[in-house]
Image (tube, helix red, strand yellow):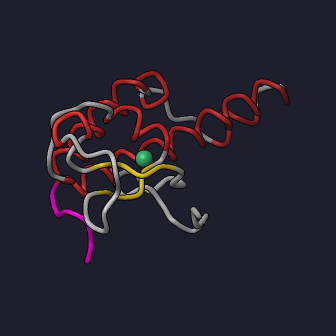
Amino acid sequence: MIDSSDVCTYCGALATDRDHVVPVAYQGVRYFTSSNWVWACSECNSFLVDQMLVTVQDRAAFLAERLAKRYRRVINMPHWTQEELSELGDRMRMEVQRGLKMKRLVAQRIENCRIVSRHGVPA
Ligand SMILES: [Zn+2]
């Protein structure tokens, strides 16, 4: 039923869930109509549970803050030059490179949330 090509409306990660844009707790509606939900990744969807935010823009702004807070350490990782990386042992270098890759992915997800919070979902 879920098409793997769908991405999270908020952060752009792989979507696995459907997010009720007016939360179930506030509209009292548990079913999905064609217009009361958007695709979301499981992390964004779990952050949004029971948040009284009724527009995609407001939900995206909330997520940008939450993601920035959760991944604060990753985001604050210092930049490493190629020269600095080459001075590390293999194992340490792989760890640092893994962290830097995660930093790029998280920064991209947060930026996507900020774009959606400003402009909404592209038609
Ligand atoms: Zn997401």
Q: Is residue 16 magenta?
A: no
Q: Is residue 122 highlighted in magenta?
A: yes
Residue nearest the viewer, comparing 15 with 65: 15
Residue 45 placed where, x, y %? Answer: 40, 40
Q: Provide the major secondary structure of the magenta segment.
A: loop
Quarter the N terminus occupies: bottom right
Quadrant that contains the C terminus: bottom left
Given residues 111 and 89, the one toward you in this image is 111
With respect to residue 10, does 85 lie above or below?
above
Does residue 98 appear left or right of residue 44 in this picture? Answer: right
x, y percent for residue 98: 67, 36
Q: Decide which of 41, 100 is in the foreground and name it.
A: 41
Which residue does the image show at 76% across and 24% down from the upper left? 92
Q: Tell me where residue 104 appears, x and y as whole percent.
A: 50, 45
Q: Residue furthest bottom?
A: 123
- Residue 108 visible in the current orientation: no
Q: Is residue 94 visible?
A: yes
Q: Position of residue 43 (x, y in %)?
A: 46, 37
Residue drawn at the location 20% of the way across and 62% of the way down: 120
Report the label total. 0
Q: Is 79 displayed left or right of 89 in the figure?
A: left
Which residue is painted at 41% across and 24% down in the image? 70
Image point (48%, 61%), residue name = 7
- Please give the range of residues in magenta: 118-123
Q: Is residue 109 above or below residue 121?
A: above
